[in-house]
Amino acid sequence: MAAPPDPSSADEIPADPLPADRLAELDSFLIELNTAAARAILPLFRADHGLEDKGGGEGGIGGFDPVTEADKGAERAIRALIAARYPDHGIIGEEYGEDRPDAEWVWVLDPVDGTRAFIAGLPLWCTLIGLRHNGTPVLGSIGQSFLGELYIGHAGGSRLMTRGNSRPLQVRACPALSAALIATTDPALFVGSEQQAWQSVRSGARLARLGCDAYAYAMVAAGTIDLVIETGLKAWDIDAAIPVIAGAGGFTTDWRGQPVGAHGGKVAIAGDRACLDAALVALSLAAG
């Protein structure tokens, strides 16, 4: 069996490189973006959401890749605010593509992560908004507006804002995989050796929960889930979570224990480094 990866390879965001006043300005704007997204999304949740199938099966299961007017309307609202406030910033979005992706500042958007949960009326979907500075994710949020929850953070700290209250986020200690509560979106997304790797980790863990999409990332930051394993992620699926997890004391890596690349891929998120290392023993064999 392979040895666990070197902990020094983890995707640990360094101390906040931005001046405090600049960080506060961007943090406030991130909250504003989430508010605008919620206005576009919530009237369509558990209502006529204008379901379409993107087709082609990309990012889908069984060839079905849904999109709703909530996805498109929320991204339009976010993009309009960014263009008005920071016209020199770039954008990478799931629904409307790239605009200056190599800019100094780039917003990475997934207006409704978990569209399948959304169309099923389950409050497990999230709005993911991340901000890169010179290619590095430095600020991010995971918003669940139906529940009134906004998980927001950067390397200096993360917090949960909910209905007028705010509290710090902190991952929990879980050094043994055998004690871990783990999650993935859907085991059917794992193919070939990935499936074997997932089963190996699953068999060694205490409990697994499925179908939570990015809400599971928020639960790692909140200290209720210990490990999330995903494959086939796009940048907009993961960028926003990296600063939130780091600010709560957790770790986000690829399946080799290396920093997550600019285009997503195979990702592991954990609150405890020892738990992550134990999972990476199996995952690294299917890292590709």
Image (cartoon, helix red, strand yellow):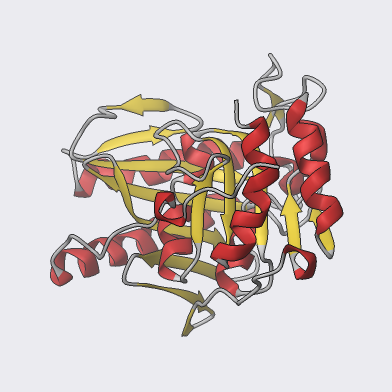
Across and down, in percent, residue 179 comes to: 77, 70
Which residue shows up at 42% across the image and 25% down it?
97
Front-most of 35 and 246? 246
| In this view, 136 is above or below 288 | below
Which residue shows up at 43% across the image and 34% down it?
93
Left or right of residue 186: residue 75: left
Can residue 95 be seen by looking at this rendering? yes
Left or right of residue 55: residue 151: left
Q: Quadrant of the N terminus?
A: top right
Across and down, in percent, residue 95 comes to: 50, 30
Q: Quadrant of residue 42?
A: bottom right
Q: Quadrant of residue 283?
A: top right
Across and down, in percent, residue 222 comes to: 58, 73
Left or right of residue 19: residue 265: right
Which residue shows up at 60% across the image and 57% down it?
276
Left or right of residue 143: residue 202: right
Can residue 36 be seen by looking at this rendering? no
